[in-house]
Image: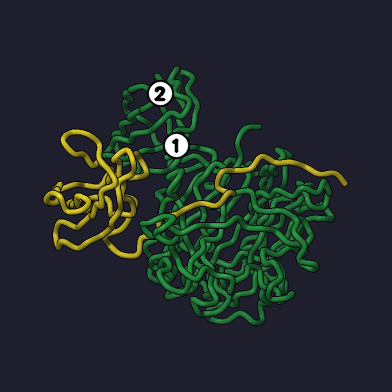
Chain colours: A green, B yellow
Amino acid sequence: MIKQTQTKMFDFSDVGLDFCAGSKNKFPEVFKKMLATGFNPQIVNSVSISGSTITLTYGVNHGYVADRVLQVTASGGFNKQVYIDSVNGNNVICTVLDGSTTGLTGTINTKIASAGWDIVYEVGNIHIYKMKHFDETDRYVRFCFQNNASQHNAIAPCIGKTVDLQSGTITDANATPVNANVTTPFNNSNLRWEFSTYPDNLHNNWTYSQGVSEYGKGICIGSPYHLIFMHNNYAGSLHSKTVAILPTSIPYALDTLEYPVIFGDTYTVSSWGSGGSSAYTARIGSHQVSFSNGINGNSGWLFDYYQKATDSFLPASIDSFNTTTTTPIFIYDNASRQLLGWCVGGLHVARYANSNYPPITSSDTPSKTVDVDFQHDCYIHPLKHSYSVADTIFLAAVVEEVKYGP
Amino acid sequence: MGLKIFRNLPSNQGLRIITAINSSQGSGKINGTTKKLGQNYSPVPVCLFRRDNRQLLWETTSKADGSYAFRNIAVGLECFVVAFYPNNQYKPVIQGKILPFDGRTG
């Protein structure tokens, strides 16, 4: 496999996170850990080095698992992110990607590395982070977390180029609409990231194990350039949610399009029900875009849910072993459905048919697989238009480096 | 308005992903070579079976250099391979008790 440290994967169950889709009181804290600070700090007892492979030995149960990225700092001068290959008891076996272990001596501290964002504002239920656009310029992402303890768990995200760090607001006129200065996540049909459908305070502090029977699995994948959540907002089948900020390749040099694309829920709060609705929207800055080519007219569908493969696998004459292909996510202007560009990486549409598709129940999805050519871990998660597999597409989040070079 | 050119990622050509639809499937792989009198030999039909219940999992044909490869096998699942000589000149050759390796690491 191609090991890399730019993009990280976090599981809601990871030691140091330990939350579920409904534990709204934990969300500001776990976002900060995943995006900016890292988590689960430990002190290494001893280290052995064999080429680019290092084995870190701890005196306690460290809680680390394979396929995460560890931030390793040593008093001898080593300060790098390394890839965890495997865990064996108190030993953690890692790869130093550049092969240089110089300075890995003295006191060694480790923690799970963050996605590489900076937190620049943190007051109450408002966080503002600094991330990178694909051209390496800064973008500010404001999250308004749920501050009503008895409502369901949701976040109002906003991406902009400028920020007022006194008031904690995005000041860019072309930022994601509505959410630049909201103080509660519900504002009619604003773009939101919905995590839970339960309008009560019973789950606010739940751990992963407390919530797994209600919400199933959940993961976060992120880098300085992108962020993806795959989770379930309710128990059972087709309660899956994917929300994301993705790097874009938009060839038109327009200031108003120089943002990553963000997508999430947009159904009106009054239409909220036990399962929530399935209305999604996407924005590049303030500009509404769609991932649908318009085959269903301007229906408001974010994806072409009906444009599915007729077979979930390539024919044996081309490739055997139940091989499924993916397509990039193309970005269309919402009004005209003219092509603007595409999502550069991180998330793809997996071409499944209405049979032989991956799991759709909350206890089993997102499901993990690998890609054939690069052996990257891939997480597959359904995104529905209705409670029918025929109206459902499958998204593939790939733990891949989304940007090569400067 | 100008145009910008970005470098493309390999994955944007489209990925091929493994779909495991039962407990026999997963990220494991089994590779081998078909030989006759010590020399690489092809094309040879090769079948992969579960060892515990003799269920046929996959079938392939060795390439011109004699190599064959199976993927989408559960890691740790004991298997055996049967290679059939073309035209039935000889008895099939069996290689028993093969453990798939984790395709993510090799």
Query: Is residue A308 shown above or below A248?
Result: below
Question: Callout 1, which amino acid?
Answer: Leu
In this picture, residue A382 sits left or right of residue A155: left
Residue A399 visible to an observer of this rendering: yes
Crowd band around label 2 with a 10 angstrom C-alpha radius: few (<14), some (14–19), many (20+):
some
Q: Nearer the viewer, mark 2 or mark 1?
A: 1
- The chain identifier of the residue carrying mark 2 reads A
State the image quarter where residue B49 is shown: bottom left
Query: Is residue A319 shown above or below A93?
Result: below
Q: CA distance from mark 2 to mark 1?
A: 16 Å
Name the residue furthest right: B1
Q: Are marks 2 and 1 on the same chain?
A: yes
- First in residue order: circle 2 vs circle 1: 1
Q: Which residue lies under the disc numbered 2?
A: A107
The numbered dot on residue A70 is 1
Query: Could you tell me which quadrant the N terminus of chain A lies in?
Result: top left
Give the image location of residue A241, x and y in percent.
54, 66
Give the image location of residue B1, x and y in percent.
88, 47
Q: Nearer the viewer, residue A124 or A343?
A: A343
Q: Nearer the viewer, residue A108 or A288?
A: A288
